[in-house]
Amino acid sequence: MASTQTAQLLNDLNNSGLQTSNPPVYNAILGLIQTVDGLSTDLQTQINLLAPGGVGVIPNNVTGFIAIFTNANVILSWDSQGAGFSYEIRLGSVWQTSTYITTTIASSIPLNPPLVGTYTYLIKVIGPTGNFSTTAIPVTFTIPALGPISLTATNLSNNLLFSWNAPSSTFIIDHYIFTRNGTVIGTVNSTFFVYQELVAGTYTYSVQAVDIAGNITPLTAGSTIVMTIPAPQNFTSSGTITDTTFNGTKTNCITEGSPTKLLAPVNSTETWTDHFVNNSWTKIQDQITAGYPIYIQPNKNTATYVKIFDFGSSFANQIINITYSTNIITAAVALGFVIAWSPDNITYTSIPAGTGAFISNTFRYIKVTITFTPTLTTSLIELTNLTVNLSTSISMDSGVASAVSTDAGGTVVAFSKTFLVPPAIVFTTQSPQPIYPVFQSVTTTQFQILVFDSSGNRISATVGWHARGLL
């Protein structure tokens, strides 16, 4: 005999309208009621949900929710619940406050490769009637930082050959950033880079990898190299000027002594009275007691000296080197140098800070700006020598010339390089008979060759040539 609850379920089922609106569901529930007496109220809930005007079935929660990594992206995947179901994905750990990502009928979605960090994604099923599953199922994954880089370098005649390993990474490495003294000098897709240093000095080189997500390797001791580079070979001096009077533009610095020296940083405008009044001193012992045994102390925070060097004629493709000497009077003073060049002493172009540079442009004037930065208010330094050196490359060029006896004035031969001044030329011959090549009309781009036999007759011949000159 059916229980009172079973009778109520049958009554509710028959009054639900399912018998005509959805016979298969009606028959399935009827079979359950008839088979099991006193079913739980869950069946009552499903009858109400399925009835016309009800809210529909609550779908099951997602199963098999995982994150799959490829070298190009992250794929979220889960078990499909079949036709009629869709899935909503959110980013975050709490459904209500998470960021909506997408809704899809597929059982997986690709994500753009994310930055380094930990991420939690949530998923819910959406049933055929629009109901969400009750629980947001999470998946959490971490994108680790890129692995370390080990940078090595070889110096071949001032051609620096750098190489490094590809770091471990979740995603594809897109490119490498190469820097010199903190300034980017190259972006490459390989693990090899070549750079030519034309100015002697100590430089810091670094490389960083960047993956397709934008993740970048940190600068470490392994990815950074400090190298002391000697002056390039095959360079010769083009000109040297030494500042012996320090008559440039001075700010908070003065000249003194013989030979002349530049003292910085100092207050070059205050009088003797100002010096004591401004510091609330009445006698010299007050200054000494305050810790300033030298009259010109305390000094200004910074000082500058600007000097223009006129080389008298135009130059190009020159290495600029600044040399100087100092005497520290008290405490350290940091010196910073900026070089600028100009063809006319009107418009100047500055180049990266430092005491050396390569200038390919045509110039006549070099402006040097020195900034003095003291470490203490007692800091004083003397600049005793300031010299600007120009040097240019001595380069070789060679080839084979086919001299033709009928060429007027000689056969024209072009250099493969453009020299700064006409180069020196030597010839080599392999003729079984004595022949005598000579040249004339040598310019920075070409020369003319004539060949004579032992009788002084002009002949046609093939002659090797070598040119050596300044670039």
Image (tube, rainbow, N blue to C red):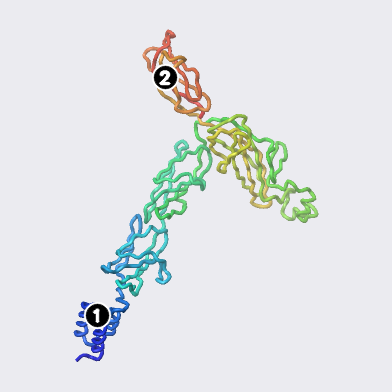
In-image side of 401 versus 334 (left or right) = left
Q: CA distance from mark 2 to mark 1?
A: 110 Å
- For the residue pair 253 and 128, the one nearer the viewer reads as 128
Position of residue 297 relative to residue 314, above or below, is: below
Residue tagged by mark 1? 18
Find the residue positioned furthest to the front: 20
Instruction: Estimate the x, y position of residue 139 in percent, counting from the top left.
Output: 35, 67
The residue where tag 2 is placed is: 428
Q: Dot 2, how many residues are within 10 Å of its Cα: few (below 14), some (14-19), or many (20+)?
A: few
- Quadrant where the N terminus lies? bottom left
Under mark 1, the amino acid is: Leu
Q: Residue at x 56, y 36 (%)?
A: 320
Q: Nearer the viewer, residue 419 or 393?
A: 419
Count how many numbered circles sit on residues in the image.
Answer: 2
Q: Nearer the viewer, mark 2 or mark 1?
A: 1
Q: Quadrant of residue 253?
A: top right
Picture residue at 34% right of the left edge, 55% below the top: 71
Picture coordinates of residue 17, whole percent (x, y)? 25, 81
